[in-house]
Image (cartoon, rainbow, N blue to C red):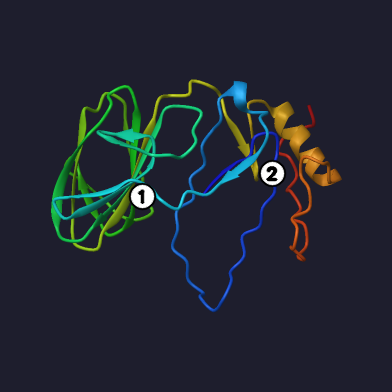
Amino acid sequence: NLMTAGHGIVHTEQSVGEQRRLHAAQLWIALPAEHADMAPRFDHYPDLPQWQNNGVNHRLLVGEFGAYRSPVFTLSPLIAIDLEWEEAARIELPLRDDYEIGFLPLIGAFELNGEIFSPDEFAYLGMRNNSIGLNAQQGSRGLLIGGAPLNEEILIWWNFVGHTKAEITRAQHDWEQGAPRFPTVSGYSGERMTAPRLPWNDV
């Protein structure tokens, strides 16, 4: 699923059924300034490119990799690959050297460029990487993510993302006032969340 907030969007995250444990990764993608005020949208992609190499399952979430192209809507050059080891193996992934690259272990430990990275650690590799080598045991899983540098200042406060403090301040005010850009979620009966106080004076 891809939710593009744009001018403003509201959603809920609720457990359904009897399952109590959920292991997931939620990635935030910064919109370029020229698209920051676009209309919000939600897209579901049930089918993504998948292939296997050397005992490792690859699922292309975003972008292009070799002959594969993800259908996921993007507004800047990006790549994200979900990697799952069915057996212990080392793989080598060719990369674009103009992309910033990072790797996030989800399950298991990974050897990357001679260093070991575990879940809850993020390996930032920067740019100028022609390839990346990953060594892991059976059952390991991780995310390769990257893209062209945005070269724009991005601010994040609570659930708001903007390019200036004024944008964040306006979004918080609109949220508190129940402005049309932040409507009530249909079918949700819980309380509306309260945003924390801004860490700066109103601008």
2 or 1: tag closer to the N-terminus: 2
In the rendering, at what x and y percent does residue 23 appear? 44, 63
User: Quick check: 86 left or right of 175?
Assistant: left
Tag in front: 2 or 1: 2
User: Quick check: 49 left or right of 6?
Assistant: left
What amino acid does circle 2 point to? Answer: Ile
Q: Nearer the viewer, residue 4 or 130?
A: 4
**What residue sits 32% from the left and 51% below the top?**
142
User: Quick check: 53 left or right of 145?
Assistant: left
Mark 1 element type: loop
In the image, farthest residue toward the bottom: 18
Q: Is residue 135 above or below residue 128?
A: below
In the rendering, at what x and y percent does residue 18 appear? 54, 79
Q: Which residue, given by chain and number where applicable, does mark 2 sit on? A: 9
What amino acid does circle 1 point to? Answer: Glu
Q: Which residue, given by chain and number where applicable, does mark 1 sit on? A: 121
In the rendering, at what x and y percent does residue 155 appear? 60, 32
**What residue sits 16% from the left and 45% below the top?**
91
- Mark 2 is surrounded, within 10 Å at the Cα level, by few (under 14), some (14 to 19) or many (20 or more) other residues, namely some
- Mark 1 is surrounded, within 10 Å at the Cα level, by few (under 14), some (14 to 19) or many (20 or more) other residues, namely few
Mark 2–mark 1 Cα distance, whole angstroms, equals 30 Å
Residue 170 is marked as none
In the image, farthest residue toward the right: 177
